[in-house]
Amino acid sequence: MDRSLTPDIFARLGTRPIINACGIYTDLGGSRLSPTVWSAMAESNRQYVRMVDLLESSGRILAGHLGAEAGRVTTGAAASIVLMVSAAITGGDGAASARLPDTTGLRNEVVLQRNQRYKYDRQIPMTGASVVLAGTEAGTSEAELEAAIGPRTAALFVPAHLDGAGHTVALARVVAIARRHGLKVLVDAAYMCWPLEAMPGYVAAGADLVSFSAKYFGGPNAGGFMVGTRAMIDAVTANNFTRYESGPHLTIGRVFKLDRQTVVGVVTAFEEWRGADHPARWARYARLVEQLRARLAGLPGVTAVARYFTMDERLVPDPVNSLVLELAAGHRLTHAELGRHLAEGNPSIACDVQADKLIFCFDAISDEEVDTVGTRLLEVLSG
Ligand SMILES: *Cc1c(COP(=O)(O)O)cnc(C)c1O
């Protein structure tokens, strides 16, 4: 059996380990830390550090990579949304920070284009702000975006993966409109860490703060970072978890407390990701997909095709990272039954089970685990 599946630690805690053939999902633990990242985190455990200093110096390194003035490691992109919006509302005014989520008397509206609603916009109102939707399901015109701006608007918010989607105003134009009104532009670019060349683009386009999630670049699942202007990172700091006990204000960022090990893990993982051989990473996925496909070839009533399971969960041809398995109509098993056999077997295998297919995504799996998935599939399908 694959040694990475040694069940001891999880057995001790009463939990069964799984093989993750779903991809990068927080519910499944997010990411697997590389030996380099893990050892850097272990090294950081040996000494204490002033967290205020570590956040500033690590932020400078991250900002330097993306052409920004400043940066901050956070506990992830969802936390970053709260910190970004808090910063836009309070602008570094500590007394105002101490009142959140009471935003009485503050600019407390965040404009989001109707077709850019997404599951993490739930984080915006946690600050006490309200979301003002611009435009309709048909899209948003520049005039509609401007009409949504009022005397209480603090910022315009853009989820980067939905930039321009559904006839929305593109980021560059959102920035131009925000500038005209003296407003901030906040960007959630959580999973836009590949291709690498795209990452500095949001700051270059004029966004005031841009956040990324570490789970997508091999960092700790409870990690992420943001970069942006000096003034806005300072405003983030004023709302953040540090100096809760030693500073003048009790801030809402305290719930996003970080440890030094995670800060080191995020920076180390990001630098490793920047230096990684990404063509080799994709070639590895393709090789593993082909390896599993070949093992299933010839099984009656089973078709398996290579696909790209995208970050927003669409299946497209390229570049390959997944195997899509379909059972013929008269097959002994339904897709749900096959998924259940895999989940309940030993070892337990998690894949994306849909009514008409199973998707095995290899973004987060080891070579040995793919071998085990193949063996289990052959057992269940020919059993
Ligand atoms: C995963 C994700 C988030 C949340 O990131 P965390 O680091 O897990 O908090 C936010 N936005 C998008 C688009 C994501 O995919």
Image (cartoon, helix red, strand yellow):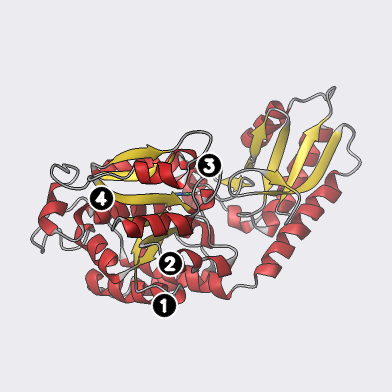
Q: Is residue 231 left or right of residue 279?
A: left
Disc 4 on helix, strand or loop? helix
Packing grade of label 3 (10 A; few <14, some 14-19, many >=20) is some
For label 1, count other residues whose C-alpha is less than 10 Å away and answer few (under 14), some (14-19) or many (20+): some
Image point (23%, 41%), residue name: 128
Q: Is mark 4 within 8 Å of ligand 1?
A: no
Tell me whether the residue at label 1 lies in contact with that at label 3, contact meaning CB atoms closer than 8 angstroms: no
Q: Which residue is mark 1?
A: 64
Q: Earlier in the sequence, mark 3 or mark 4?
A: 3
Q: Secondary structure at mark 2?
A: helix
Q: CA distance from mark 3 to mark 2?
A: 43 Å
Q: Earlier in the sequence, mark 1 or mark 2?
A: 1
Mark before the other along the chain sequence, 1 or 4: 1
Q: What's the amino acid at mark 4? A: Val
Type of amino acid under label 2? Val
Kindly identify the amino acid type of the residue bearing the numbered disc 3. Arg
Front: mark 3 or 2: 2
Say whether marks 1 and 4 touch (CB < 8 Å). Answer: no
Mark 1 vs mark 3: which is more N-terminal?
3
Comparing 152 with 239, the one in front is 152
Q: Nearer the viewer, residue 357 or 296?
A: 357
Task: Please state the horizontal and vertical placement of residue 53, each as a whole percent of the image.
Answer: 25, 75
Task: Identify the residue under disc 3.
Answer: 16
SS state under label 1: helix
Left or right of 236, for residue 122: right
Quadrant position of residue 331 = top right
Q: Is mark 3 within 8 Å of ligand 1?
A: no
Closer to the eye: label 4 or 2:
2
List the residue tagged with mark 4: 255
Residue most extreme to the front: 143
The alpha-carbon separation of the residues under discs 4 and 2 comes to 27 Å
